[in-house]
Amino acid sequence: MKILVVGGGGREHALVWKIAQSPMVKKVFCAPGNPGIAEIAECVDIDTANIDGLYTFALKQKIDLTVVGPEDALMSGITDRFREGHMQIFGPTKRASAIEGSKVFAKTLMRKHGIPTADFKIFEDIKQAKKHITTCEFPLVVKADGLAKGKGVFICKTPDEANKHLDDIMKEKIFGHAGDRVVIEEFLSGEEVSILAITDGNAILPLSSAQDHKAVYDGDKGPNTGGMGAYSPVSFITQQLQFFIEENILVPVIHAMKRENRPYKGVIYAGLIITSTGPKVLEFNARFGDPETQVLLMRMKSDLVPILLSTEKNTLEDAEIEWNDGASICVVMASKGYPDSYEKGVPIFGLETIKALNHVQVFHAGTAIRDGKIATNGGRVLGVTALGKDLQEAQKAAYGAIEKLSFAGVHYRRDIGAKAIYREK
Ligand code: AMP
Ligand code: GLY
């Protein structure tokens, strides 16, 4: 088989790495990819927004399956375009990916179908929104409706803070039309967990649990990022809790999408918070998580390719996944300044040394070739991912590998997995 992976970050590097190991696969292409991916697949210089370009390439190369990484391609209708041309593709349609693209849609769907989530109200009018917050308890959460690169959510401690963010989103339009509407919701406290499941629109196949570390600094301080690191499995997700999540969140959301005439195929990512009254949904994403995918695929023993294919063939019911019993961890090495502005083109040292390490994979995210050498090219640069017999061993291996890697201004969190290790003691 020939497979095309769309995207060029750490998540796509992990997908390509896993897919390339399948005995079913003869060749993997990645568009646009990155220098790490280029070592194991053929990278093609087509942007993820160029749906026609990707379709034409896939048709010409007789690609058997296209796997989509980023949400923008899904929301631009890549899946719809490929299916119209009878090309196999893994991912939800444009209408189905609204579950990530619009928080208003996702929250309304959850309320209508009884899926547990924070209580909320939706506003199109800033005056009404501001009036509403005078009646609210604090902290409360203000969310822009549309995609905002993970920056559209604000936890507000005071009415002044909430008013400021409402002004930024609805008046100053810092996120453009993504801020035409806002969701104002109750603040929830608890541990967060990412539960991903593959679905063919009927059956669901949940993956193992993972926990992201969104804040930029140690101790969950500082602004949120796309994710500074993750680990898997999450020990507080007991078998019982996992079943509860499947029965009360994953199965209902897939059925709800079907009933709303937006049948959902692909991977659904539930961002959950485990409150004192049970798990509640913070958000749904229509794609694999980044860096959750890196830790999940590191632990996945089964071949991923037949699972991806079974969503197109509607045979997921028969599929199973085998996991490594140990634990995996991913520590993101980021550019100085991320998630705000940062420099690009800074040379990276030590990548060759790492290749000799067992149970460690360095997934490239924002890297590029500059003057014949690998250099930084984004906020999140590398995802150093390790597998161990337990989380402690995996953590030691990942941070051991990081010591061998360097670039000027590198920033990474020193406490990925630390809370979980402390909890398990
Ligand atoms: P979201 O993009 O909706 O998942 O929000 C990003 C992050 O904001 C989440 O991972 C949480 O840490 C935080 N967050 C979002 N909604 C809430 C809420 N209702 N209560 C507490 N924290 C929240
Ligand atoms: N790690 C968070 C996300 O993929 O949205």
Image: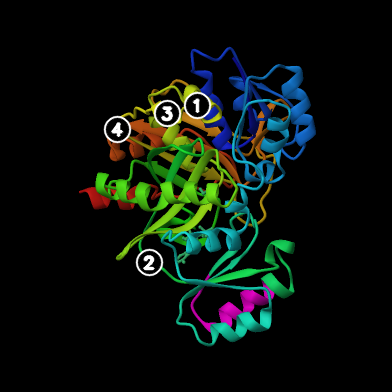
Dot 3: what SS? Answer: strand
Kindly identify which residue carries mark 1. Answer: 310
| Mark nearer the viewer, 2 or 3 | 2
Residue type of the residue flagged with mark 3: Val
Read off the residue under disc 4: 326
Relative depth, front residue between 240 and 378: 240
Circles 4 and 3, Cβ within 8 Å, touching? The answer is: no
> Do residues under tags 2 and 3 come within 8 Å of each other at their CB atoms?
no
What kind of residue is marked 4? Gly
Task: Using the numbered discs, state the Cα–Cα distance from disc 4 to disc 3 in whole angstroms.
Answer: 14 Å
**Count of numbered circles in the view:** 4
Is residue 167 highlighted in magenta? yes
User: Residue at image x 73%, y 68%?
Assistant: 173
Residue 50 to residue 422: above or below:
above
- Is label 2 within 8 A of ligand 1 (CB to nearest ligand atom)? yes
The tag earlier along the polypeptide, 2 or 3, is: 2
Judge left or right: residue 415 versus residue 310: left
Q: Which residue is labeled 2 in the image?
A: 189
